[in-house]
Structures are given as C-alpha cells and as structure tokens.
Image: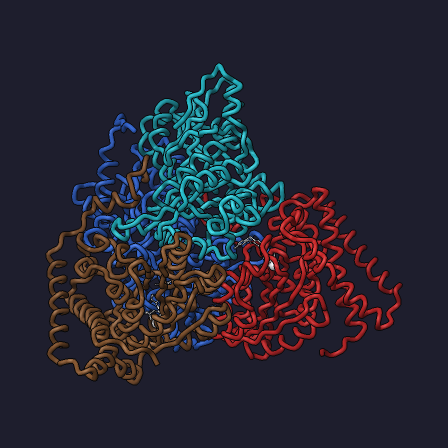
Chain colours: A cyan, B blue, C brown, D red
Amino acid sequence: MRLRLPMYIPRLRQALMAETRYGMAINRALADAMQADASVVLFGEDVAAPGGPFAVTRGLLAKFGPERVRDTPISEATIAGAAVGAALGGLKPVVEIMFMDFVTLAMDALVNQAAKAHFMFGGQCSVPMVVRTPHGGGLNSGPQHSQCLEAWFAHVPGLKVVVPSNPADAYALLRAAIADPDPVVFVENKTLYSIKGELADVPQPVAIGSARIARSGGDATIVAYGASVAAALKTAAALAADGIEAEVIDLRSIQPWDERTVLESVAKTRRLIVAHEAVTAFGVGAEIAARVSELAFAELAAPVLRVGADFMPVPFARSLERECLPGEADIMAAVRRSLDWKPNARIKP
Amino acid sequence: MRLRLPMYIPRLRQALMAETRYGMAINRALADAMQADASVVLFGEDVAAPGGPFAVTRGLLAKFGPERVRDTPISEATIAGAAVGAALGGLKPVVEIMFMDFVTLAMDALVNQAAKAHFMFGGQCSVPMVVRTPHGGGLNSGPQHSQCLEAWFAHVPGLKVVVPSNPADAYALLRAAIADPDPVVFVENKTLYSIKGELADVPQPVAIGSARIARSGGDATIVAYGASVAAALKTAAALAADGIEAEVIDLRSIQPWDERTVLESVAKTRRLIVAHEAVTAFGVGAEIAARVSELAFAELAAPVLRVGADFMPVPFARSLERECLPGEADIMAAVRRSLDWKPNARIKP
Amino acid sequence: MHMELSQQDLLSLYETMVLIRRSEERLSRLFADGEVPGFLHLSIGQEAVPVGICAALQAVDTVASTHRGHGHALAKGVDLRGFFAEILGREEGLCRGRGGSIHVADLRVGMLGANGIVGGGLPLALGSALAHQVRRTGGVAVAFFGDGAMAEGVLHECLNLASLWKLPLIFACENNGWSEFSPLERQFAAQLGALGHAFGIPAVQVDGSDVEAVRAAATRIIPLARRGDGPQILECKTFRWRGHYEGDPQKYRDAGDLADARSRDPLVVSGARLEATGIPAERMRTLERAVETRIEDAVEAARLGREPDYAAAAADVYTQAAAGAHG
Amino acid sequence: MHMELSQQDLLSLYETMVLIRRSEERLSRLFADGEVPGFLHLSIGQEAVPVGICAALQAVDTVASTHRGHGHALAKGVDLRGFFAEILGREEGLCRGRGGSIHVADLRVGMLGANGIVGGGLPLALGSALAHQVRRTGGVAVAFFGDGAMAEGVLHECLNLASLWKLPLIFACENNGWSEFSPLERQFAAQLGALGHAFGIPAVQVDGSDVEAVRAAATRIIPLARRGDGPQILECKTFRWRGHYEGDPQKYRDAGDLADARSRDPLVVSGARLEATGIPAERMRTLERAVETRIEDAVEAARLGREPDYAAAAADVYTQAAAGAHG
Ligand SMILES: Cc1ncc(C[n+]2csc(CCOP(=O)(O)OP(=O)(O)O)c2C)c(N)n1
Ligand SMILES: Cc1ncc(C[n+]2csc(CCOP(=O)(O)OP(=O)(O)O)c2C)c(N)n1
Ligand SMILES: [Mg+2]
Ligand SMILES: [Mg+2]
C-alpha cells in the first residue's frame, strides 16, 4: 500500500521520503523481505560476517542469525546450484555473485537448472530465487571485474533480469524479485552503490517488466537502464537548453522489457536511442533496436541508434576505460545524429 | 591453393570432389591440420579411444597417438581452461565440449581468460585455440541438450564464432579456425553431421568473417547460418516456383559477421529476413537486424524480420519440439510478410 | 553383517527392483520400435542401488537424480503412468512431455528430477538439504551421481560446503565403472572414500548388487545425517549391463567386462535370498506378473495419451504470465 | 633439514624478497596518493613463497598467478619498469596499461599473468604443463593459488587431470589463512595434503616465512615433476600483513591475529640467517639501497610514461585485424 502524501506538508514528506543510498536501499529491501517472510535466506561470499564486499548486506547476520545469513566458500557454481535446490525445497534464497564476471562460473545452475525447472517439469514447481550481482566498470577494475553480461540472461527463456538505476527502484525491484516465483537475476551497477535518492518509508511497489518514464519529451526517445539512466538524463537536460526535449525511459527490467512503453514513446517522438554500458554488439540494445525497428518501422523518422561500450574488454587505465565506456557525450552525439538524420541520406556499406 | 577444374572432365571432377558427410569433413580437417602442424592437439570427453560421441574424431587417436589425442574426464571447466594454458604454451589445442549446453561449465575460461588474454596482456601473446561444440535440437534431446547459445560468445570481444552449414565450409572453417591466432568457438549443428556435400581433394579456403551467397535473387534477402541455411534454401526454391527470387546468404561466421555482403544484398532486395535456430529474443538475429535497420534505413522497403525458436526451453516431445523450432514454413511466412508489407501499415503497440 | 530383513521387507525390495527392471526392458522395446523419442539411458543391473537407498528414506526426503534416473524415480515412488507417459512424450506425462526420460521429476514424492547435466544434481541436492536444515523438516537429501560425475568440480565444492554446514546430505555414488565409453581408471585418479575422508565426511562402500547390503548401509547412515551429524558418502559398486544409451553397440567394452557385469544380477542375488526364506515360487511369479500388468497398463495409457499442449508449454516458461513481452 | 645455502645464494633470495617488499610498500604509498587506479592486493609478509619457489625454477618454466601476484611476477623476473608502468596504467606497462595490478604478465619470462578469477590460474597452469609435456620442453608449470581458491571446483578437476596425465605441474598453495574477510576454517573443510593424497599427488607443507625452507622443498619436488613423476603439491603456510586490498580496514581481524602475522617476517628470518653467516651490515644496506634505487627509477619512469594508446587497444582485441565488423 502506498501512502499518498499531501504535498503541502513538506516536513512530513521529508520524514517519509528519506534520502537513502542505493546500497542501503538494497540492504533495507533484504531486511524487510526477511522480516516479512521466514523462508527468505541469504548466502554468498563474505555476505554474512563481513557484511558484503560492498557493505550491502551489513547488519543482516546480526538481525537474522547465522541460519538465514551465511558466508560461503568461493564456490560460485555451488552457490547458484544450491539456490536452485533450496528454492525447490521451500526457501526463497537470495544469493550473491560478487562480480558479474564470476557468473561465468555459475551458468549451469542458472541456465540449465533454474531457468528450465518450471517449464521442464511441466509446471510442477517454481524456482523462487534471486541472484544479486554487480556489473559495470568505472572503478578501473580491469577486464575481469567490469563486465555487463545481462544480455546473456535475457536470451534464456525462464530467467528474468532487472537492473535498477536508483535507490527507490532498487528497493522495489528487489522486493518484487524476492516475491517473484521465478528466478531473477538482479543486476546492480557498482558505481551506483553510493548514489543517493529518495526512498519512502512505505515504498511504492514496482512490477518486474514495467519501465519508468524518467523524463518526458517529444523530440526523441532515449531508452536506458542501470547507470546509463543518469547519463541519459544529463544528456536530456543539456538538450533542453537547446530547446530539444528528449524523453528518457528507464527500462528497469531487461527480461521481460516494457515494449509497450517504449513503442508508445517512439510513436510520439519517432526517434529512438538505446543506451547501456554493456558492449554494443549483440547487447541488450540490439534486441530493443531490432524489435522497435520492426514494430515501429513506419513511425521511425530515423534509424534506431545504439550507444554502448566499445568492442573490447574493459581496459584498466583511467583514460582507456573512460574512452571505452559510453557516456553523456556518446548519447548526445547519437541523439544529434538521430535528429539530423536526412530521409534520403544513404549510407553505403 | 585451389585447383580450377575443367568442367569437361567430369570423371576427374568426380574424383576430386567426393561427397563427404559434414562430420567426416570435420574429421578430415582435424586430421589434415594435425598432419600439417605438430602443435595441434585434441582433447575432450570421449574424443580419443571412443572416437567422439558423434564419431567425428574417429581414427585420430590411431593416427596421431595418445600424446596428441586425449580423452579427458568430465571436467568442462578444466578442458577449456587447459586449452588456454596450452595455447599460451605453444600448442594449438582443439577441444570439444560435448553439447553446447555444457559450455555453461566452461564460460570462465572462454570469456575471462581466452577472450581477453591477447588484449589484456597488451598483445604479448595470442590464444590459438578452438572449441568445437554441437548445438541445436531436432533430436528430441530436451531442454538441456538442444540449446543454441552462440549469441553469448558473439557478445564477448576477443572470441570468434563460426557455424558452418555444409561439409565444405565445415572443413574450410575448421582449418581457418585452427590456423587462427585467436580463440574460435566452432559450432556444429548436430542434425548436420550426417548430411552429405561435396568436398574437393584440395578444398578452397574460407576466411572467418566471410559470408557466402548460397542463392542469388533480387526480391528479398534471407540471412541464415548453420542448419537454418538449408531451410532458407528450400524456402527460396518454393518461392521461385511463385516467381519470387530470394537471395540466401549463409553467414558462416557470427563474430565477426560479414556486414558488407549483407548490406550489398539488402541494397538490392530492400527486404531482409534473418533466420536461425536459436531463440529469437536477444539472439544473433537481433544484432543483424539492429545493424541493418540502422545502416540501410533508407533502403529498406519493409522492416527486418526475424525467425528463430519460440521463447521457451527446447521441449522434448516430438510435436512440441517441431513447433518450437523454426522451419521452412516460418521463414516462408516471414518472407511473405516482408513482401506484403505496406508502407503505411501501422502496427499498434 | 547387517540385520536380517523380514521376508515381507525383502519381497518389497525385490518387487521394486522388478518394477524398475521390467519398466526399462519395456522401454528398451518401445525405443527399438521408435516409440520413445530422444536418448534413453537404462540402469538395468543397477536396480539395487536406488531401491536399497530409497527404502531407507522417508516421504519428506528428497533425491536429485542423474541422466540414468529411471531407477531413482521409480524407487522414490513417482507415478508409474506419469512416468511412462513422460518418456513417451505425452501430455499426461509427469512433465507434460517437456522433459522426457532425462528430466523425469515428481516433486510430490520428493524426486527433484533426473538431470541432463553430469554432476548437475549435486548442488541441487545440497540446496535441498539446506532447505531441510533451515526449515527443520527432519528430512535429508540424497544426491545420486555416477562415477563419471566424480571428475566434475562441483563434487568438490559440494563436499566442502556440506561438510562446513553439516548438511543432511547423502552423496550416493553409483559406481558402475563407466563414463559413457571410458572406463573409470582413465577418468578419475582418486577413491571417493579418501576424498570424503579429506573433507571429514564418513564414507561407506557397499556391494551395489545386493539390495539388502545397500539398504542396511543406507539405514545406518541416513539417520546420522538426519540427526545433524552432517553429510555421508555411500559408494555403491554396481554394473551397467547395457550401453551408455540404447543403441550403443558397446564396441569399447570387451566380452569379459560384460560377462562380469551380468554375473552380478541384483534380481538373482535377491531372488536367491528370497528362495532361501522358503517363499513359494508361485508367489514370486504372481508378483512379477502383477508388476508386468501395472507396466502394461501404464504403457497402454501412455500410448493413448494426448499430444502435449503447445500453448500450455508456451505459457509455462514463467510461473505466471509476466508483464510485457519476451520476444 | 635442508642443505645449507651459500651466503651468495641466500643473499640473492633476500634481495628478491626486498625487491618485492619495497616495491609493494612503494605501491602502497602510490595508491594512497591516488596514483594507482583500481584495486591493489599486496603480498607483504608472503615474499618467501614466490622467491623460494621461483629460485628453484628454470627459464623455460611457467607460472600462473593470482590476484595477489606482484611477488610471483617479480620473483619470476618480469621487467621492473614495465611492472610499475603497468600498475600505474601507462603505455610502457607490461600490458600497455590494459590489465593493471591484477593482470600483470610477462610471457617472455614465463609469467602467464596475475588473474582476477580466484582459481582461474589453475587450469591455465595445467594447460601450460600439458604444453611442456607434449612439446618436451623440459619445463614445469607452477600454479600459485590461495587457501580461498581451494574451495573452487576447478582445483579438484585439476588435481584429477594432472594426476591422470602425470603432468609436470606444481600446485603451490599460499595459505595465508584468509579469503578476503573470512578465515580459512569457515571456508574449507579439508587439508590440502589429504586431498592430494586422495589423488595420489605427493604433498609437502612448509613454513612459508622461511625462504630457505621453501626453496629447499621446491628444489626437492620440482625435479620430480620435471622428470615425469607427475604433479606435486607444495603448501606454504604464510601470513597476510595487509588488508585484503589496500584500504581494507581489517575490522574482521583481531589484534592477536595481526600480531601473529607480523611476528614471522620473512625478511627478518632471512636477515638473521644472513647476519649469522657474518655478512657485514653495510653490505646489506647497500643491497637494500640498490633495490630502492631500482624501484625509484622504475616509478619515475612510469610517472613519465605515456597515457595508453586507445587506438592500439581497440586494434588489439584480436591478434590481427579480422575481416568484417564486430559491431
Ligand atoms: C556436464 C556434462 N558433461 C558431459 C555430459 C555427457 N555425458 C552424459 S552421461 C556421461 C557419462 C556419465 O558417467 P557416470 O557419471 O559414471 O554415469 P553413468 O552413465 O555411468 O550412469 C557423459 C559424459 C553431460 N551430460 N553433462
Ligand atoms: C571466481 C572469483 N570469486 C570471487 C572473487 C573475489 N575474491 C577476490 S580475492 C578473494 C579471496 C581469495 O582468497 P585466497 O585464494 O586465499 O587468496 P588471498 O587473497 O588470501 O591471497 C575473493 C573471494 C574472485 N576474484 N574470483
Ligand atoms: Mg558410470
Ligand atoms: Mg588466502
């Protein structure tokens, strides 16, 4: 239940809409879910006593005890596989894979077991589990600690994938993911952990699969998720100074993704830019671009353009990483290209 | 070097262009590569003494001995990881992952190690290894033995991905993959192993990244790879009976893929259908559709359409699997939709 | 060596073994006739392992199985009609025709599924054991796995985690000496017992062709896991009579090895034991015929079953219709 | 216990340990000053392990390292300037600034790279050992790994395969008792030696703070692997002085544990041994100053280095420009 707050009581509003960091919003979602449902358990590397490598699970061991909050050895395949078995056994495990790069060690459990059990066993059971994992660069962590691999999971029928961009969504989507009967890959961009945002005392729920219009505008649509939403919003603000109104859609869920909201926006703006931090080629943006290019073929005034990381492993050095990862300037350039696109421009192969 | 055969000596031509099965073409490529280069070694589950689960490596142990042709235990992570180390150590390992579904156990080695070493170590070294793995359904093998996961690898900078559709390409692309300094994922559709095709005594080389125009036509372009090429060709033949000439492009390589050949064809036909056996959503077709929709925006007379497996794990029962996997009828329907597309047709979200 | 079983108990074990044997023989014929789609891995010769272990289990207990899972399924009590209907790819199948032989599951009886991934059942069983522990169900989980699966890293991870967390988990190895077409000695350099020992997990080795011996060992160690002593290893030496899958000509196997395998028939071992208890031959034949009748009934029902419902399958990718589109 | 080393040999070991210690201390200051991007995992306190082992290696031998790899790199003889330039993210770095501390590699000296994936170096080293065996290089491969890595399944797979194939592979465990913020006893239920034993792999445990002891053990077992006896395990008990990474406040660690760690300083142990040989204190100071000069030179060079070349990086995703586009 959401409290509707009278806007003329700013002090109350303040109290109920405290500023919270993204990491702490996740922490609160975990605590609230564990409080509400004794079957929710947490395990992963260093999540219990140490409180998580990014301090996201801090305090939960003290609150819920060592039976429900557990440190595991460095055994990603078994962390994920045990989550499947635990989910089949009546628990709602929330497990952590410390960096998304390490899901490479847990793919069998996620793809061959978790994703398929409900379907493959004829609907006999569900697999209510959540895998939390941080993706993304920006910390100069180098090629094996910076990847965005969510497109892999979106390609696997049976998995859901969400990537919240702000504390309120992080809270609400994690609650939704834990409540969801199916396996959800919950992706957290590491650079977001410390960002602040409002989180209501009684936060509004968000359904998995529903996008959010982060800014309205009629001239072009920018679809983004995760850390790229902030870049898209900054780009839109800069464009507004030039009188161009970009609509920014925060996708929030990648699988399923909110096709309707995107298409409605494109029907209005006739221009679409998809931005994410993952490598452009064969990334999430490819599906959105392909789908919108098909369904809105007649409406589009310019080709759908994609903005993502350059085609390389995420490099270590500051200047290299900065140049590799997409930013405001790249989104801006894409919007400009879209706006400037001439109907009879012909790009030769 | 390719022999140019005078067409008026049909008997000689016969002799030099023997019919070979796809599986045997791979076998011959392995044997020829091992003969030519002592650093080529083979290992995997049941590849040596048993000759491979699909008999593809039969006879190689006898020919090249137990040092170079080895059976491994059931340890996919280590098979792939050892290939990386062996490649760094001066060998050219060709390893087998028995079903593509099991690459889920080998992702770390492929994605975090093999794909990145050349880049991440500043170009000091290369990783000349090949992972052979069969994908696809059609044998009622069920959800964990039928997946097509090539899109994952195409999304990883540093890996190359090829999917030959016929014996001659299987031979030539495997030789190219083994000769390639970088890691190549070599995908074999299981239903192709027994198909026959011509293979010259001195086969023509094929470069990774070069597509093949399998049939010429001016009315629509069908891009396909692997087992879907045959379905595309059958569709094209059926269309020809109605006076419609579809051009069929066999992509052969997924990463890199031959953008130029596809764009040239689309410039001519103005219509594109992409067909593959993998799940449509977030599949290889998404990238091709997104890219062509962008680069050929002005040329396209209809939206790029995609044909792939339905969004579900590949089901076991015959009727279910048949309905789930894409076939001629689906490609035909897509071509018809493309041809019938009206410029002002407006599909509501 | 182990406590004497009553004739009735022994007969009941024998009956389940006969059920598995005859079911698989029937499947073999159905496969030869083209009525079974896909692969078929038979466990003929290995029946005493699942039967002996499952006889020591309770309804709350759970088992995770392998690609060679018919015995585990039938011994854990899955519905026989649903079993045949599944393997024949029918809507009435336990998995509505979506899984087949290699994915037979019946969650109602704690059978968490056959598994197409070698070693895949190990962490599933571990997670199930965790659920038993946290939810205090009083149950234990059993991970069945073959000797070939011992080479997978996940065994190591599961031995370690089960030991650290003292999980009620039984590692039940069916050591038939073969991984597909390769013999154990070229596949695995360790003894499972020594491995368990390294992790502080007690291990028992038992003649997997002797259902009483398997049951006795299981009856001894399962209560230990149940009461909180932590994981236990039960290694059963057994024999695979048939090829790795139906249709496998077994060229890699010499006649001696095959003869060895057939020399230890769990049905013969137990049959002889039953005979020694003075059971009338007629009673045995009646039992066998009753089993065969049940099987024929299930086969007939499966044959008459419907084609699986495609729309229902498409709607079952997620537990409930999700918002938005998937593609 | 082990043969006496000449003063000269001992001094050379000591010198390399000083090189590692001072390099990491320097890196720590550079990190605090914001000159090192990313994470930094220091191996201060553990220097005797890589130095003792690498002293027993030949040029042809290869080592696969971990996230805590500075010691392995320097002991194996990577270029010092390239080392600092890499960690500071310069074009002149060993990896042209693309890898950083956690990916330092120098293939010319057989250093196959630090590794961001715990356990990731194990199969790499195994593959390298395979290459040594097949190509008859006469070399051995060393897999360095921490106690935390022992929980990864890949260790099990590698022990098995190395044993089956009798590979010239050294499993070199740096057991510092910590996996990030968690102590060994909550991470791993087995002893590495017992595990090795199960696979038929000989295991030696050694005081990893005593470089002579490490060298002696390495000198004994490496020739066994080299001559074809198969893999060997060398477990070195050692101490991590610093946090898991620089900036880690180590709240999870009590004062006693930290004091314990510091009580066994490999430099002090060897320094005392050297003193006992009657070496003049002046000679030691000269040596230390020479090392410091080399380090300062490398740091200065790195600081003056160029920003890495982005176009060159983009062109280096594959070994040579591939046909077609990647996206
Ligand atoms: C991860 C994985 N790798 C390989 C296979 C192919 N495969 C199926 S069964 C099998 C052999 C298994 O041997 P074992 O565990 O001893 O079981 P058994 O067949 O003897 O019952 C192999 C290699 C697989 N299904 N999964
Ligand atoms: C596959 C994987 N899982 C988790 C991590 C995160 N991580 C980095 S170091 C580390 C602890 C490693 O402990 P240990 O092997 O003992 O090495 P030490 O840090 O003590 O040298 C962890 C969990 C990782 N890098 N890779
Ligand atoms: Mg076996
Ligand atoms: Mg450690």
Please name whichever residue, C324 or D176, is drawn nearer the observer in this view of the structure: D176
Instruction: Judge whether A305 appears above or below B177 on screen.
Output: above
Residue C272 locus on image (x, y percent): 21, 83
Residue A3 locus on image (x, y percent): 42, 24
Split into quadrants, the picture shows ligand 1 in the one at: bottom left
Please name whichever residue, B103 or B284, is drawn nearer the observer in this view of the structure: B103
Q: Residue at x 30, y 58 (%)?
A: C110
Would residue C321 be found to the left or right of residue A347 on screen?
Answer: left
Visible residue check, residue C63: yes
Q: Residue at x 73, y 55 (%)?
A: D23
Residue B203 locus on image (x, y percent): 36, 63
Q: Quadrant of the N terminus of chain D?
A: bottom right
Instruction: Judge whether B85 appears above or below A348 on screen.
Output: below
Instruction: Judge whether B112 appears above or below A168 on screen.
Output: below
Instruction: Judge whether C125 appears above or below D169 on screen.
Output: above
Please name whichever residue, A173 or B140, is drawn nearer the observer in this view of the structure: A173
Q: Residue at x 54, y 34 (%)?
A: A21
Q: Quadrant of residue C259?
A: bottom left
Would residue D28 be found to the left or right of residue A334 on screen?
Answer: right
Q: Quadrant of residue A54?
A: top right
Visible residue check, residue B186: no
Please name whichever residue, C159 or B348, is drawn nearer the observer in this view of the structure: C159
